[in-house]
Amino acid sequence: PERRERLAALDVGSNSIRLLVAEYGLHTGITIIDEDKEQPRLAAGVAQTGRLDPAAMDRAVAAIRRMQGVCERRGVTRLAAVATSAVREATNGDEFVQRVREEAGIDLIVIDAETEAALSYRSVAHHFPLAGGRTVVADIGGGSLELISAVDGLVEHTLSLPFGAVRLTDLHLDGKRDQRRAVRRLREYLGRQFRRKLPIRDWSAPVLIGSGGSFTNLARMAAARRGLSATDPVHGTSVSIAEGEHMLDWLAGMSRDRRSEVEGLNPQRADIILSGLAVTAELMERVEAREVRISAFGLREGLLLEMAGADTTPAAV
């Protein structure tokens, strides 16, 4: 039997921290054996203060320590840990990195937006046929939106915009103003920004693929509304622009408490889902996509693929 190695990828995001543990063999490729996720919301307040909040740091360090324990129990021999937008932009990001090293024994690498986009793309390219025209890949995180435009599977443009779901909620949807009006204003702002930053010749795409919690939650809610199970896997499913618009409109008319009871929506996202869906709706309009295809994988799987070497077969889901 071939030698199989245990690898782990830790993605310290601006909203969620996710762990993926996998077994890797040269011939069998990657098999995911464990997953873990927590939402300490590291980006909370960063948009206003420029700093990571001490309580958010405590929550995140505790989550990372716990996940480090999972890695030990699973016999992981190699761990890659990366941090994205919130830690990258905060003036005290290095203090957080130091705490993770001291308290969890993990060397956290703060990656730039380009690397972040490339890792997300790597995962998508692994699961979706990207030949035949232009594909736009969008990853909505807590702090930023990473965009990639590829033609026949080759990356032509990458762009990182400060349109993460936590950041936009903090800045535009504070709950003090009329919610529907605030969402409409946010959409107008995003529409202007997308028109300025995404020239149609480079970004108009018949195929749009979305990864990140905003997209997976949209897909689960859409499934529930179609009368399907909200717990079915959403990877590879599609949501039309009309469904996305309808969902945003429907949720914008609810209180946060009411939203947290919506089938298919993670209650921890009840406050940030509106900004995530506003980005989705305006982006779909700008790139002229009729639907968005959902990738349940993202950066953390891209990391695993990188650790294993590029020529590996897709992760068995």
Image (spheres, rainbow, N blue to C red):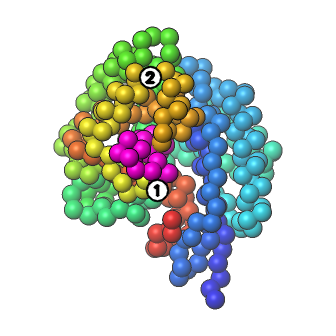
Asked if residue 309 is positioned above or below residue 232 in the image, the reply reads below
Q: Amino acid at mark 1?
A: Pro
What x and y, as percent, mark residue 229?
45, 51
Mark 2 and mark 1 residues within 8 Å of each other at the beta carbon: no
Q: Which residue is mark 1?
A: 233
What x and y, as percent, mark residue 133?
21, 57
Which picture quadrant has residue 59?
Answer: top right
The answer to whether any part of residue 136 appears in the image is no
Furthest residue in direction bottom, as rendered: 1
Judging depth in this view, the residue of 68 and 39 nearest the camera is 39
Classify residue 296 as left or right of residue 242: right
Asked if residue 94 is positioned above or below residue 35 in the image, the reply reads above
The crowding category of the residue bearing disc 2, from other C-alpha atoms within 10 Å (few below 14, some 14 to 19, many at least 20), is few
Q: Which residue is mark 2?
A: 254
Judging depth in this view, the residue of 164 and 51 nearest the camera is 164
Furthest residue in direction left, as rendered: 201
What x and y, as percent, mark residue 268?
58, 34
Residue drawn at (59%, 23%) of the image = 45
- Labelled disc at residue 278: none
Number of dots carrying numbers: 2
Residue range corresponding to the magenta coloring = 212-233
**Disc 2, SS:** loop
Q: Amino acid at mark 2?
A: Met
Which picture quadrant has residue 77?
Answer: bottom right
**Disc 1, SS:** loop
Residue drawn at (54%, 79%) of the image = 28
Residue drawn at (72%, 44%) of the image = 63
Residue drawn at (72%, 46%) of the image = 64
Cα distance, mark 2 to mark 1?
26 Å
Earlier in the chain: of badge 2 and badge 1, it is 1
